[in-house]
């Protein structure tokens, strides 16, 4: 499959890119298994689910443990897999552990009423009205702790296709070792498939809009003169700041206020012509790191320093700042591209770097957050038949978004997001998108959303969706 | 290891609350009985009380309502009007205490080991029920029931209650439960003649 790129038909390409934009969804979770385990409300950890409040963030970062958790806070007693005293007998016995007494399964269901208008390449407009996508997706997952220092998350997503078939995706499958040594919360390690903490605070458990932040997570840098827009169904999987990785990550909190993250992951998957059955497209690993500092509010580990907490538990007057970087290597992974002259080429991204700044400000019922992302790539073009190297370009792009969430009532949140990406290919103007979202909790675990998304450069591209999400 | 202390706690609370409230030297008798709640397995946490007793009753010593294991303990706390309730937070997480009932109050949010006091000064038409809520944990619920006199008891897990040191006389015995109700019943207590009154509460 070859991507057809023309230097002159950039408008059409940009439109295609936006078609994709309207299709990507955020994939955040609410985990009622925890509500059962602690017999507590969703509001203990969430603002408008899946968005976490400061306590929920601490619970997540601590490996699904409440700050200062004691055994008596767990209302569902676990099953012992060995008395703790067996630790003294090791290696002459199996190290003891625990499992929950019931399988901590939880389900999220999403229904959508979709209204979309899309400008086609030939200038016509396609409109979809009240397409009842019931259901849109169902997530089944389990999450919890296994004794003092182990936690896990596994999630499968079932999304229904128009022909009635179902696509299953394994979104998470990870095990964490929480504070196995050293001071509490200074070292956590996870391995498996997971959402990397490099995007903590602006993805996964934070984005309450249905639309994902495509400017940051879906920009595709591959192109003759660098990238032109967002990744669609591009094979192999596009080179982007990943929202899921396969690998190993370490993270921890220093002095309640700082977060460190470092990961080593597979990176870009194999080219479709690769028959080795491998998951990683090459032998090089991608690496990432992040450092955050939070000023004011609750500590990242839930520490309040003995100060009183705000009685409205979504409030957390604070400023959190972060820097992050992801360095990838996609050498020997071919992205097929046909030039305007009709020459079939393969482009490889020998190495790429994504660096970013993150800021999040909570003030009373308002949360404003955003990310600036800079990307650089090293694209090598090869003749698809002869494998002769045709040239190298080193394009740059940048993207940023800012989002404001305002809580009108504990059950009603309004969100606005502006996002933009300036592609590396100079012939392509910046993509700009606005998203409005109103989310209402009609019950603690049932959410109704109305979301309007608009291409701010091409007014014929817009969508207005009504969504119902529930978690149990 | 989980400590199952709720059951023991309820029985102790019922006994402990009554004794210190009894007027000193009163040669009273006891009213006891069992409360059943239709549709519920347990008749626990019902307040059985004498609606009106002659005389005025000074505020008792301050009593405590704990927030522990993310619960209000005791779940139901009857007090004589004028009593100070000390709200303690025993959990490592911050808790808040407020009540949307009657004159309403919000004591704020405080960390582990600290207490805040609230005086339940008056109650014009007993029982005055104040639902105790925590903004941080919406599932948390407790009740302070303000009464005219100290002749009250909370039922234990078996639904049993005992009001001791009741001065001889004829009274009306009321019962309060968060989810069920029943009509008050007359009761007469003699100097050495304890009375038994059972209630069946319906929705
Ligand atoms: Cu609480």
Image (spheres, coloured by chain):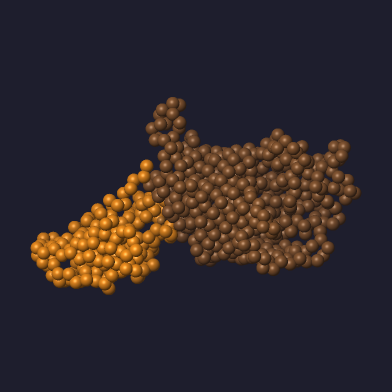
Chain colours: A brown, B orange
Residue B92 location (% of width, % of height): 40, 49
- The quarter holding residue A281 reads top right
**Please, which residue is most extreme toward the front here?**
A164
Q: Residue placed at 68% from the left, 51% from the top?
A: A216
Left or right, B123 with reference to A403 = left
Image check: B61 left or right of A314? left
Seen from the viewer's position, the closer of residues A45 and B161 is B161
Q: Where on the image, by quarter, is ligand 1?
A: bottom left
List x then y, in percent, for residue A346: 82, 42
Is A427 or A162 nearer to us in this picture? Answer: A162
Q: Please provide percent x and percent y for residue A330.
A: 73, 40
Q: Would you say A436 lies left or right of B84 here?
A: right
Q: Residue at x 45, y 45 (%)?
A: A100
**Viewer-proximal residue among A265 and B65:** A265
The percent coordinates of residue B191 (x first, y second) are: 9, 65
Residue visible at 20% across and 60% down in the picture? B162
């Amino acid at each position: 499959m070859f991507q057809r790129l023309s230097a002159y038909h950039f408008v059409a390409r940009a439109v295609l890119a936006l078609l994709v934009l309207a299709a990507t969804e955020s994939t955040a979770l609410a985990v009622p298994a925890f509500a059962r385990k602690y017999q507590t409300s969703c509001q203990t950890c969430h603002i408008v689910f899946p968005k976490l409040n400061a306590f929920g963030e601490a619970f997540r970062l601590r490996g699904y443990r409440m700050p200062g958790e004691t055994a008596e806070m767990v209302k569902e007693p676990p099953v012992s897999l060995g008395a703790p005293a067996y630790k003294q007998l090791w290696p002459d016995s199996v190290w003891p552990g625990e499992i929950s007494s019931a399988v901590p399964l939880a389900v999220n269901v999403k229904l959508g009423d979709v209204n979309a208008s899309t400008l086609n390449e030939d200038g016509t407009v396609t409109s979809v009205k009240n397409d009842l996508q019931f259901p849109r997706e169902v997530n089944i997952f389990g999450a919890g702790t296994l004794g003092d220092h182990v936690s896990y998350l596994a999630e499968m997503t079932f999304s229904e296709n128009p022909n009635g078939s179902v696509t299953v995706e394994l979104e998470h499958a990870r095990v964490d070792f929480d504070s196995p040594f050293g001071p509490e919360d200074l070292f956590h390690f996870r391995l498996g498939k997971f959402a990397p903490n490099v995007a903590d605070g602006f993805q996964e458990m934070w984005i309450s809009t249905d639309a994902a932040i495509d400017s940051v997570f879906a920009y595709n840098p591959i192109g003759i003169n660098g990238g032109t827009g967002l990744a669609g169904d591009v094979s192999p999987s596009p080179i982007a700041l990943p929202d899921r990785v396969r690998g190993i990550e370490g993270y921890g909190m220093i002095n309640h206020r700082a977060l460190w993250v470092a990961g080593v992951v597979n990176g870009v998957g194999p080219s479709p012509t690769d028959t080795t059955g491998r998951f990683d497209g090459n032998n090089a690993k991608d690496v990432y790191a992040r450092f955050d500092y939070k000023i004011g509010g609750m500590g990242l580990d839930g520490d309040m320093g003995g100060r009183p907490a705000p009685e409205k538990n979504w409030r957390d007057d604070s400023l959190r700042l972060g820097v992050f970087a992801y360095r990838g290597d996609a050498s020997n992974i071919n992205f097929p591209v046909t030039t305007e002259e009709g020459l079939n080429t393969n482009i490889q991204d020998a190495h790429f770097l994504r660096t970013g700044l993150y800021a999040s400000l909570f003030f009373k019922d308002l949360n404003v957050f955003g990310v600036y992302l800079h990307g650089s790539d090293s694209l090598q073009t090869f003749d698809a038949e002869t494998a002769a190297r045709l040239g190298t370009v080193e394009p740059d792009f940048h993207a940023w978004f800012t989002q404001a969430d305002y809580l009108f009532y504990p059950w009603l949140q309004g969100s606005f997001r502006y996002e933009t990406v300036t592609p590396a290919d100079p012939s392509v103007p910046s993509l700009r998108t606005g998203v409005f979202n109103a989310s209402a909790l009609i019950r603690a675990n049932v959410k109704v959303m109305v979301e309007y998304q608009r291409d701010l450069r091409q007014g014929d591209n817009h969508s207005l969706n009504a969504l119902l999400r529930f978690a149990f | 290891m989980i400590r199952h202390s709720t059951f023991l706690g309820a029985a102790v609370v019922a006994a402990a609350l009554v004794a210190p409230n009894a007027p000193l030297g009163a040669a009273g008798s006891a009213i006891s009985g069992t409360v059943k709640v239709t549709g519920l397995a347990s008749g626990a946490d019902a307040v059985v009380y004498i609606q009106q007793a002659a005389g005025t009753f000074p505020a008792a010593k301050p009593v405590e309502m704990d927030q522990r294991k993310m619960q209000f303990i005791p779940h139901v706390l009857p007090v004589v009007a004028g009593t100070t309730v000390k709200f303690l937070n025993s959990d490592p997480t911050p808790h808040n205490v407020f009540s949307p009932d009657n004159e309403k109050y919000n004591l704020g949010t405080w960390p582990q080991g600290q207490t805040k006091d609230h005086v339940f000064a008056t109650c014009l038409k007993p029982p005055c029920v104040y639902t105790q809520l925590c903004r941080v944990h919406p599932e948390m619920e407790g009740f302070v029931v303000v009464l005219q006199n100290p002749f009250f008891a909370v039922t234990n897990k078996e639904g049993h209650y005992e009001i001791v040191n009741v001065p001889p006389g004829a009274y009306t015995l009321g019962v309060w439960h968060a989810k069920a109700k029943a009509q008050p019943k007359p009761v007469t207590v003699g100097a050495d003649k304890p009375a038994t009154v059972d209630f069946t509460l319906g929705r």
